[in-house]
Amino acid sequence: MTTLEFKNVSKKYRVRGSGELLALDKVSFTLTSGQTIALVGQSGSGKSTIAKILTQLERVSSGEVLLDGTPIPTWGRPLRRYRQSVRMVFQDPFASLNPAHTIRHHIERPLRLDKVVPADQVEEEVFRLLNRVRLSPEQTIDRRPHELSGGQRQRVAIARALASRPALLIADEPVSMLDVSIRLEVLNLLAELQREANLGVLYITHDLATARHFSDEIMVLHHGTVVERGKADDVILRPQHPYTRALRDASPDPEKHFAVPTTPGATS
Amino acid sequence: MTTDDLLTVSQFSVSYDVTPPVEAVRNVSLTVRRGEILGLAGESGCGKTTLAYGIQRLLKPPAVITSGSAVFHDESGEDFDINTMDEIQMRAFRWEKASMVFQGAMNALNPIITIGAQLQDVFSTHRPAMTRTERRLESGRLLDLVGVGSNRLRSYPHELSGGMRQRVMIAMALALKPQLMIMDEPTTALDVLVQREIIEQISELRAEFGFSVIFITHDLPLLLEISDRIAVMRDGRIVEIDTARKLYENPTHDYTRRLLASFPSLTGERGGFVRRPGEPALDEEAGSIR
């Protein structure tokens, strides 16, 4: 059981000319293994800043981030060990894999670096990981990223993230760059892996519909503060905060749209 | 009634003349009616953008129109066949009769020229008789119309937010009061709140000016809300075209059904979405990832 805790975390960015930008304002939440939380909010609300702090690509300005009660390390070996347990899947599968290296290389690297398995079992483990994300190892292992489709690439990115057997996974818009007909499949795969490995998942998205169905809870971020957090269905169906309501009402919802006879083309 | 039709596309095909040739648009026939919003839905590579460019004859080699015609029925009663116009006629036709909001419109503005100057360019080219003052006033009026405000005439694109830049693009497309606006993924890069504002703006403007819109996107839920009719495209063909409601309630083509199923409902049941282990993949094609 792993618990990650954000305690009154604030983050300021220095902006040239206009002083400081408060990207996060005293944000507190916890993420436990086995739990899925969706983080939603419009552009600039601070979603990615949270992801960057979790992976220690950015430091907090004030407040604390605790992993099982101890502050997360900021440098050296301890930081590398921390990053073993908190992994990230990025938005753009076209940019997050190295075009010069084979799929084997991408997945072997964390296995070897983190010494997840003895050296003679690395190959076997790569096969196992590719199978887990439903890629045929024989067909993909020696290919390079450009030979794979977007969906396949994102599966490789997921396999790589799972290689060091993390307790928590941060998925920053993992399907928004994929074609619509394979988005659900990749999300379904993530959900399945989450259950199998009892992962804690932070699903960062602006798509309320998938947020609702993918995660147990939804956390709504607005101007760097958490304005609402609750069970996924409650937040979407019975939003308490006006901002959440605005977000929900702005999202296309054909079901509601066609529930009452309307003039086609009317939007409000 | 034929007089209600604005654009008739028939047996339209476009190929990319590479080896082997890619048939991007195959025998597409469709009609855009006066004042309607026609949604064009499909995934990447289905040919929707190529079709839109083809209608405006904006395709560059190696793309060639291999067959078919697109005829624009002007409100004056005159017909324009885009295949028979020469470059000069075509240049006058574009923007005057049919304008376009390009994909990635947020980045379609010239970063080193003020938006006012870019708007006025339209008038210098198409309305050479207008004076400088008239051009400036008209550009300001357009910015007011789309809610950016005429006080932003002297702003550079980087001084505006993504949503505002998008509105500037729409203002530009509206400048000559065209009868048809083609919008290629106009809101894809924007977040939902801004997207909603822009969509409402488009609806209001359409009600005011009565132009037709071809709205291209992969976002089917959005199309269902704003379109009168929707055409679903796949592999260069239109697989289904119907009113938004019929398409939603009673899709006849398998692919339409699959596309609809790809978008989980916001307020409805979970449907085929996650949390159900062992649920089969959406289709054998997606399954071919194996």
Image: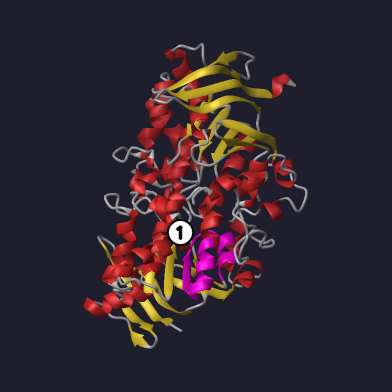
The residue shown at (60%, 51%) is: B282
Characterize the local packing of mark 1: few (<14), some (14-19) or many (20 or more) Cα atoms within 10 angstroms. many
The residue drawn where x is 29% and y is 69% is A120
SS at circle 1: loop
Q: Is residue A193 magenta?
A: yes
**Image side of residue A183 versus residue A94, left or right:** right
Residue extending furthest left? A76
In terms of image quadrants, where is residue A234? bottom right
Q: Residue at x 29, y 53 (%)?
A: A98
Which is more toward the observer, A216 or A134?
A134
Which span of residues is magenta-colored? A189-215
> For the residue marked with disc 1, what is the amino acid?
Pro
Q: Is residue B108 above or below residue B94?
A: below
**Residue to which mark 1 is pinned:** A174
- Residue B3, x across and y down, in percent: 70, 20
Please say whether residue B232 is one of the residues in the magenta stretch: no
Q: Is residue A111 left or right of residue A262?
A: left
Task: Determine the chain carrying the residue at label 1.
Answer: A
In the figure, B11 relative to B102: above or below?
above
- Quarter of the view holding residue B129: top left
In the shown orientation, is residue B33 left or right of residue B136?
right
- Between B130 and B30, the residue placed more toward the observer is B30
Q: Looking at this view, name the residue that lies furthest to the bottom.
A: A69
Q: Is residue B236 visible?
A: yes
Q: Residue at x 75, y 21 (%)?
A: B1
- Labels in figure, total: 1
User: Residue A31 location in percent, x, y?
Assistant: 47, 78
Residue A180 location in percent, x, y?
54, 49
